[in-house]
Amino acid sequence: MTRVLVPLADGFEEMEGIIIIDVLRRAGVEVVSAALKDGPVQAARGTMHLADTTLEAVQNDDFDMIVLPGGGGGAQNLQRDERIKQILLRMQAKDKYIGAICAAPNVLRNHGILKETDRFTLHPGTINDGSGGQYVDNERIVRTGRITTSIGPGSAFEFALDLVEQLCGKAVRDKTAAPMYLPEVSAE
């Protein structure tokens, strides 16, 4: 079964983290949400969330994809965590999928995952002074090889469905999207 790691850090954007987890699970993907620390994770809007496990418990497991939710504080906490950096570097070395939304593409930039010629998008209010990649303005989702980035909370459903398509194919994407009745999502 396809396995995806979604690390949850204090300050993560609720919509991004939960929609990514939910949509991937609807598609039959095994999603492991992992908190950076023991106990509940407080998201950007103050809601509290319980992850499936801790990052400590799964940091050496094999995954087909890692997806970083955004949220300014959440992305900063992901970037500060050395384990996240090591997981990202290992995933990239094994040619695995990597996704990041909103502020989280900055983590990829600052850890050298996005190279100078790699295209990416992110929430324009969060672009920092990091290096790496070519910022693409006004695109909701940008793929460069096996790295997928997305602009922000409003693109969370289409981002998650794009990840489903990469992992499971277009037919599974369409089957997953149809019962959600999302606007502008093909169910053909």
Image: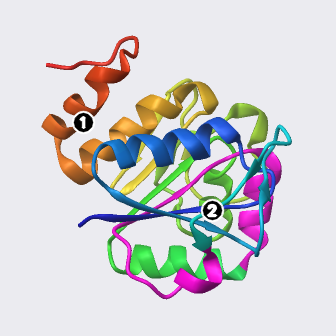
**Left or right: residue 181 compared with residue 129:** left
**Left or right: residue 34 compared with residue 96:** right
Q: Position of residue 67 (x, y in %)?
A: 50, 57
- Name the residue at 27% across, 33% down: 176
**Left or right: residue 65 compared with residue 83:** left
Q: Which residues are magenta?
A: 54-81
Question: Helix, strand, or loop for circle 2?
Answer: loop
- Name the residue at 77% across, 69% down: 39
Res. 33 image quadrant? bottom right
**Residue 159 shows which numbered tag?**
none
Q: Position of residue 69 (x, y in %)?
A: 61, 50
Q: Earlier in the sequence, mark 2 or mark 1?
A: 2
Question: Helix, strand, or loop for circle 1?
Answer: helix
Tell me whether circle 2 and circle 1 mark residues in contact (CB < 8 Å).
no
Q: Quadrant of the N terminus?
A: bottom left
Say which residue label 1 marks: 173
Is residue 65 in the magenta section? yes
Say which residue label 2 marks: 51
- Mark toward the viewer: 2 or 1: 2
Res. 7 image quadrant? bottom right
Of residues 127 and 47, the one drawn nearer to the viewer in this rendering: 47
Q: Position of residue 54 (x, y in %)?
A: 64, 76
Q: Amino acid at mark 1?
A: Arg
Q: Is residue 129 visible?
A: no
Q: Amino acid at mark 2?
A: Ala
How much space separates mark 2 and mark 1, taking CA atoms? 25 Å
